[in-house]
Image (tube, grey):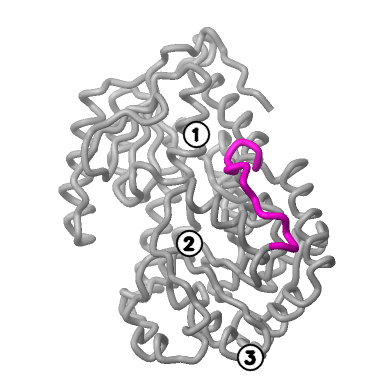
Amino acid sequence: MPVVTNRRMTGRKVAHLTSVHPALDVRIFQRECKSLARAGFDVTIIGPHPADCVADKVQIKAVPVEKGRIARSTRAVWRIYREALRINADLYHFHDPELIPVGLLLRAAGKTVIYDVHEDLPRDIISKPYLPAWSRSLISRIAGGFESATCGFFSALVPVTPFIADRFLPLNKRTVVVSNYPYLQDETGSGAATPYCQRPLSLAYVGNITKNRGIREMVFAMGMLPESLAATLELAGNDLPIDVHPEELRGHAGWKRIRHHGKLNYADVSSLLEQVRVGLVVIYPTPAFLESLPVKMFEYMSAGLPIIASDFPQWRAIVEDSSCGLLVDPMDPAAIASAMEYLLTHPQEAEEMGRRGRIAVQTKYNWQTQERKLLDLYAELLEPACAE
């Protein structure tokens, strides 16, 4: 679906603000800001980045990457606020709960402000491993209460899932779901995909590598595959975190079948997915994840890969409706290994699952369907007749 430029919007200045995500974050930069720039907006991202630059017609105003959470929520937030005032945009769009005070100050100055809700904050806090267990419930209630009390002051809310939207709709009538679906593959693929049945017996996991995203279970599952099955797991993401006991994991038999690529950029991820046979998204059933819609699942589908996914009710509806993969108990390495073996040893059926998943993305779960909603919201907020 091509972007339709609204001439009255051309040149209108918008600023996206983030203190938590890198400036080139997939949702912020690749999805939202590039779409806005193509539609004619003058777009700036203020967020963590090594230096000021321009990327795909989006201006990046860098703030230093703060190492500690306290420094990030104080110094970084203050720097973002000062830069936001200096830019004097027509519309501000912020992406982190810790920037709510910045959003309120901008609203008090008469600015149009959107709050982009990436996570269900109360549930997300309950799952934070760095918080003492005794404190999580209290902090969750306080943070959730503050978010609920302030969200009605913003010009609009842009939650990432319908589940999150249900919480905010009674509090702010301009609540528009903009999901993290991928671009259609023909816009991002390298064009050098290996024919499915000629690919090595490889699976892929792309994203943050953490305990609750199933890294231990994936490694254990690889160790349970038959020795006669020359399978590998292509792992793209950060180094192993301390809470998964990295040395123990690297000493496991399953690690011998893993190739850890480190963090890959957007283009390299697309290229990797064009060379493997299966995509994995076996996330733990934590409160923050049960109602999530992980972008990696749709990226696997867009690349024509069958998926092995956690058997969550919302995910089950997507996978079963599209017949695009297998559902497993993410806490059971043997179940994950069984699904891996089945897809790798039934290539024609696996390829057909991948084909159906790609069709589902092409017809429903693609960014172009969400881009239209974002641009319509911006037009509504910035049109003279709707000015606040």
Q: Is residue 314 visible?
A: no
**Element type at marker 1?**
strand
**Picture quarter containing residue 297?**
bottom right
The residue that disc 1 covers is 156
Q: Residue 32: percent from the left, percent from the top? A: 49, 35
* In contact (CB < 8 Å): disc 1 and disc 2: no
Instruction: Characterize the local packing of mark 1: few (<14), some (14-19) or many (20 or more) Cα atoms within 10 angstroms.
Output: many
Indicate the secondary structure of the residue bearing disc 2. loop
Q: 274 above or below 332?
A: above
> Could you tell which of marks 3 and 2 lies nearer the N-terminus?
2
- Measured in 3D between alpha carbons, the distance from the residue under mark 3 to the one under mark 2, in whole angstroms, is 27 Å
What is the x, y in percent for residue 250? 40, 86
Q: Is residue 85 left or right of residue 149?
A: left
| Image-based side of 192 in relation to 95, left or right | right
| 154 left or right, relative to 62 | right
Front residue (pair 63, 343): 343
Q: Does the residue at mark 1 contact the one at mark 3 (Cβ under 8 Å)?
A: no
Which residues fall within the magenta stretch? 185-198
What residue is shown at x 23% (from left), y 60% (from top)? Answer: 69
> Can you identify the residue that label 2 sits on?
207
Judge by depth and name the residue closer to the eye, 295 or 261. 261
| Crowd class of label 3 (few under 14; some 14 to 19; many from 20; radius 10 Å) | few
The residue located at (49%, 46%) in the rendering is 267
Q: Earlier in the sequence, mark 1 or mark 2?
A: 1
How many marks on residues? 3
Tag 2: Cα neighbours inside 10 Å, few (<14), some, or many (≥20)? Answer: some
- Residue 89, above or below 124: above
User: In front of the other: label 3 or label 2?
Assistant: 3
Q: Residue at x 20, y 24 (%)?
A: 86
The amino acid type of the residue labelled 3 equals Glu
Report the quarter where the N terminus lies: top right
